[in-house]
Image (cartoon, helix red, strand yellow):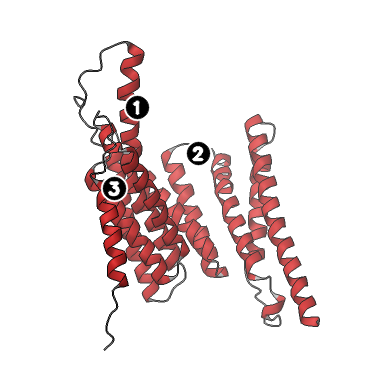
Amino acid sequence: MLLAVQSTNRGSTDLLRAGGALLLVAGATSLAMRKGMQHTWSEVVLLLLVAVPAILLFQLALPRADTDSNAEAEAPEPARAVMMVAAIVLALPSIAELLNLLGVNTSSPLAILFTLLLTALVAWYGAIAAGVSYAALLGSLAALAAWLVLWGQSFDHPTASDFRDVLLLGGVLLLLAAYWRSQHDRLGAREIATTAGIALIAAGTLGIFAGAATGISQAVVPALSHTPRGAIGAASPSPDGQRFGWDLYLLVVSVVLIWLGARVHARGIAYSGGFGIFLFVFSIGVQVSRVDAGKVPTGSLGGWPLVLLVLGALGLLVAAIPRSQS
């Protein structure tokens, strides 16, 4: 009975700490946005408004350093995880406000790159110091965003194809980093792999949105300008659009990510693969590649739907065949 009461008390305290951290973040960020747009508060006050709660939550998320306290006296793991994530969320506007106070143009690519990199470092330090895996995921996402900003400045006129290559390279590097950390039994391997999955799926889906936009423009712009559209299929496909090869890539990568997530028991990796499957179905269902090429979508059974049906049936049949055990 006493253990049940203590467990209930710890759960209530945990909930209060987590809820308080989330409310503190919501209040600080919303007030900073409102006063920042109105320019009614000084830059120093805006910096303190987001930086002080960030530092406070970061310190509360760290485990107790005194040797006299035991594990039960420390803040429960769920509350510490929420407070660390909340501190990292506040770290982003805190760094931006600090740069703004120093007279730096925070909308410049260099300032954005610095803000993202510093946020990634803060997140990874918090992940390692507090043992919070969610912080590692935020740090990996911030690093991926910084990677995109960095390469985006190296192109004169970046296109979807350029960013697709950058995402592919970033995803491969993240997978290598995740493998290295898993081999050394380090925190964050699954979170880095999840970010890698997001990058690889994004590389395979950029053409879907680019192709759909091209198809819509080819259909709408001639109608609005009262110019003849020309023969069906005369329009040349966009180099940034979706192709058969990218649909195949998206299918293979998505299936591999789902298998890998199930193999290592990482839901984030499997979720990224599931989202890729959803976008793959959307791409072949709407036939984005045909729309992008200026062609009319067909309702035939041939192509991807038939291939998927056959492969799915074969997979189930092969799995149902009993295997002799040696």
Q: Which residue is mark 1?
A: 216
- The answer to whether the residue labelled 2 contacts the one labelled 3, judged by CB atoms less than 8 Å apart, is no
Counting the numbered discs, the total is 3
Above or below, 23 against 71 in this view is above
- The answer to whether the residue labelled 3 contacts the one labelled 1, judged by CB atoms less than 8 Å apart, is no
Q: Residues within 10 Å of mark 1 (few under 14, many from 20)?
A: some
Q: Earlier in the sequence, mark 2 or mark 3?
A: 2
**Residue at figure coordinates x 46%, y 43% from the top left:** 112
Separation of residues labelled 3 and 1 (CA atoms)? 24 Å
Task: Kindly state the secondary structure of the residue where label 2 is placed.
Answer: loop
Q: Earlier in the sequence, mark 1 or mark 2?
A: 2
x, y percent for residue 188: 46, 67
Q: Residues within 10 Å of mark 2 (few under 14, many from 20)?
A: some
Which quarter of the figure has residue 239? top left
Disc 2 residue type?
Thr
**Residue at figure coordinates x 25%, y 34% from the top left:** 290
Separation of residues labelled 2 and 3 (CA atoms)? 48 Å
Q: Which residue is mark 3?
A: 305
Task: Kindly state the secondary structure of the residue where label 3 is placed.
Answer: helix
The label nearer to you, 3 versus 1, is 3
x, y percent for residue 303: 23, 45
Disc 1 residue type?
Ile
x, y percent for residue 35: 67, 35
The label nearer to you, 2 versus 3, is 3
Residue 78 in view here = yes
Q: Which residue is mark 2?
A: 106
x, y percent for residue 26: 67, 47
- The answer to whether the residue labelled 1 contacts the one labelled 2, judged by CB atoms less than 8 Å apart, is no
